[in-house]
Amino acid sequence: MEHTTSEIDADGVRADIIAPGEPRGTVILAHGAGSDRSSALLRVLTDALVSTGLAVARIDLPYRQQRPKGPPSPARSGADRDGIRAAVDAIGGRFDGPLIIGGQSYGGRQASMVAAEDPSVCDGLLLTSYPLHPPGRPEKARTEHLPLIAVPTLIVHGRSDVFGTSDEFAEAIALIGSPVRLLEIDKADHSLKPDRSGVGEATAAAVDEWLLPAIEGAR
């Protein structure tokens, strides 16, 4: 599918926007803690989602804009959520159709918190490798905000992910009151192995066949 690519680097938003000719919706994706908007997973997801007619914006979170390497600071995660809101303001109205926000691991978690704080910010969530708890620490589950999520949510989980087992995810998603679907990727860890797991095609299919219809049904 033919598409155009543009870049934003202003007003606290740094993003690559890839769009087909007439997008039927927009997906804003944030990267994981050790990466940036050019990560292999985000690129694979972008290609697959654009092929279904969606525009995709890959954003750098504020902490990554400030320094090229290193993890985010937990004390400044609020600034990263503000960065997601700024991206929504800058990009969310460019194209017709629903707006989905999300991302990989840390980025997806922050996006889910933004949606929990203000359900009007987006129409749906796409969360890949949600970091349900630190490896080996299931008692530290990051689920406090999940009951506040009020938009349809697709969670993509590698069956070998040490940040949460399939059973733990089943319990966690039961806390979400809106429509929710867990897409599990066989033989994939927290990285989702984008080069060989088929995660791009599987995710795009789930967005097309479940998330977008769920969003339409929730309106």
Image (cartoon, rainbow, N blue to C red):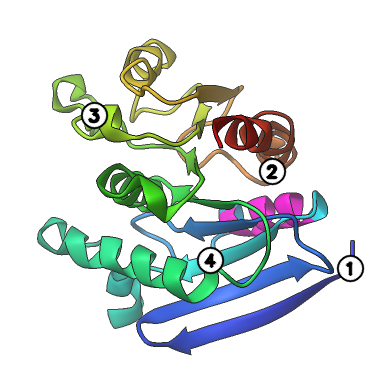
The residue carrying pointer 4 sits among few (fewer than 14), some (14 to 19) or many (20 or more) residues within 10 Å by Cα, namely: many
| Nearer mark to the viewer, of 2 and 3 | 3
User: Residue tagged by mark 3?
Assistant: 143
* Tag 3: amino acid: Thr
User: Residue tagged by mark 1?
Assistant: 2
Q: Nearer the viewer, residue 51 or 68?
A: 51
Q: State the SS at label 3.
A: loop
Magenta residues, start to end: 42-50
Left/right placement of residue 14 relative to residue 200 reads: left
> Which residue is painted at 58% across and 66% down in the image?
57
Q: Are marks 2 and 4 in contact (CB under 8 Å)?
A: no
Seen as rendered, the residue at the extreme front is 219
Earlier sequence position, callout 1 versus callout 4: 1
Q: Are marks 1 and 2 in contact (CB under 8 Å)?
A: no
Q: CA distance from mark 3 to mark 4?
A: 27 Å
Q: Quadrant of the C terminus?
A: top right
Q: In this rendering, does residue 38 appear at all? A: no
User: Residue tagged by mark 4?
Assistant: 92
Earlier sequence position, callout 2 versus callout 4: 4
User: Residue tagged by mark 2?
Assistant: 200
Q: Position of residue 175 (x, y in %)?
A: 31, 19
Q: State the SS at label 4.
A: loop
Q: Which mark is residue 146?
A: none
Q: State the SS at label 1.
A: loop
| Nearer mark to the viewer, of 3 and 4 | 4
* Tag 2: amino acid: Gly
Earlier sequence position, callout 3 versus callout 4: 4
Q: In this rendering, does residue 89 appear at all? A: yes
Earlier sequence position, callout 1 versus callout 2: 1
